[in-house]
Amino acid sequence: MRVIVMAVGDDRPGLTQSLADGIVEAGGNWLESHFARLGGSYVGSVLVELPLGGLAELKRVATRMDAEGFHVTVETAAEEKLMPDRILGFELVGADRPGIVRELSTALAGLGVSIDFLETAIEQEAWTGSTVFRARAEVVVPDSVSFDTVRAALEDISGEIVVDFDED
């Protein structure tokens, strides 16, 4: 059985080790993960393969970690679907403002494009000191939609945003 373990806690040394120890204690195998410091907290998710009966043990371990201030939840992973090989990668940069992620996700969803990976951040621009929004993404494009259509939709979000596409 595959589960997704999600964890959030005040950033401090040993959190990943604590999570890894708990997964091993439940007989699990750590398959894939994503971790980052976000808003001063340590936030992450792990895809774990568990043996039969391991779910109850992992949930017990998660409860113990939660009592220590590392909030851990366990969810059953969905069955993986075969994804088409039509992946389009891009980076997006523009002046930060509320609604950019909504505009990006709306443009993609309107075309039936699914987000496979999305990473966003804001930073201060060196020359002007203004706040700049950056996004890196990989999206799955259905056969019925051309990459040029996706490119045009992303470039139409705003004249203030620059989109750089990975080579096909």
Image (cartoon, grey):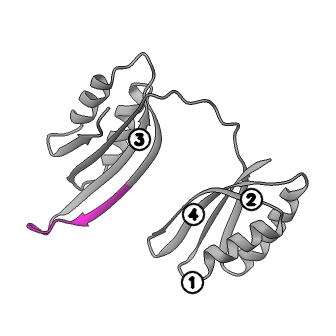
Comparing marks 2 and 3, which lies closer to the viewer? 2
Residue 138 is labelled as 3
- Of pointers 3 and 4, the one earlier in the residue sequence: 4
Residue 58 placement (x, y as % from top left): 81, 63
12 relative to 102 in the view: left or right: right
Q: Residue 36 location, x and y as percent?
A: 48, 67
Inter-mark Cα distance, 2 to 1? 22 Å
Magenta-colored stretch includes residue 123? yes
Q: Given contact means CB atoms under 8 Å apart, are the residues at marks 3 and 4 in contact?
A: no
Horizontal side, residue 10 vs residue 113: left or right: right
The quadrant in which residue 110 appears is top left
Question: Which class describes the residues within 10 Å of circle 1: few (<14), some (14-19), or many (20+)?
Answer: few
Q: Amino acid at mark 4?
A: Gly
Kind of residue sitting beneath label 1? Pro
How many C-alpha atoms fall within 10 Å of the one at disc 3: few (<14), some, or many (≥20)? some
State the image quarter where residue 127 is shown: bottom left
User: What residue sits 64% from the left and 58% below the top?
Assistant: 46
**Disc with the residue nearer the chain's start (2 vs 3):** 2
Q: Residue at x 46, y 46 (%)?
A: 117
On screen, 93 above or below 158? below
Instruction: State the mark number for residue 13.
Output: 1
Task: Give the SS element for disc 4.
Answer: strand
- Label 2 Cα neighbours within 10 Å, binned few <14 / some 14-19 / many ≥20: some
Find numbered disc 2 in the image and state the secondary structure of the residue it sits on: strand
Tell me whether the residue at label 2 lies in contact with that at label 3, contact meaning CB atoms closer than 8 angstroms: no
Q: Which mark is residue 123?
A: none
Q: Quadrant of the C terminus?
A: top left
Q: Residue at x 69, y 76 (%)?
A: 18
Under circle 3, the secondary element is: strand
* Residue topped by disc 2: 29
Q: Give the magenta range.
A: 120-129
